[in-house]
Amino acid sequence: MVAIPITNDRSAIAARIDYTKTGEVVELNNCSVDNLKAAIIKVLSPPEYRQNAQKLKAEIEQAGGVKTAADIIEAEI
């Protein structure tokens, strides 16, 4: 996964992607063809990113997945 945070909470999401090592972040002000290409190649090459993404996916599913997340958000609105 390659994140390019643009607005609002996107920086926080990008920080989580970086923290969990599930992808790379390319800041908008540093987003060029070369930088984007390098980030894509970086996440496709080693198995670490895929393994971390699969681990995070399993943790999200174990916590109840999208339905539970939506229920929590709706309860707060």
Image (tube, grey):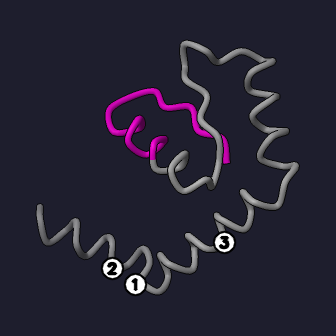
Q: Residues within 10 Å of mark 2 (few under 14, many from 20)?
A: few
Query: In the rendered view, would you say 76 is above or below 23?
Result: below
Residue corresponding to mark 3: 54
The answer to whether residue 8 is left or right of residue 21 is left
Measure how far apart labels 2 and 3 are at the Cα level.
Answer: 19 Å
Mark 2 highlights which residue?
A: 68
Q: Position of residue 73 (x, y in %)?
A: 22, 65
Q: Is residue 42 left or right of residue 62?
A: right
Give the quadrant of residue 72: bottom left
Residue at image position (34%, 39%) is 9
Amino acid found under the numbered disc labelled 3: Gln
Is 75 above or below relative to 38?
Answer: below
Q: Is residue 6 above or below residue 60?
A: above
Q: Quadrant of residue 67?
A: bottom left
* Segment colored magenta: 1-15
Residue carrying label 1? 64
The first of marks 3 and 1 along the sequence is 3
Circles 2 and 1 in contact, beta carbons < 8 Å = yes
Q: Is residue 13 above or below residue 31?
A: below
Mark 1 packing: few (<14 Cα in 10 Å), some, or many (20+)? few
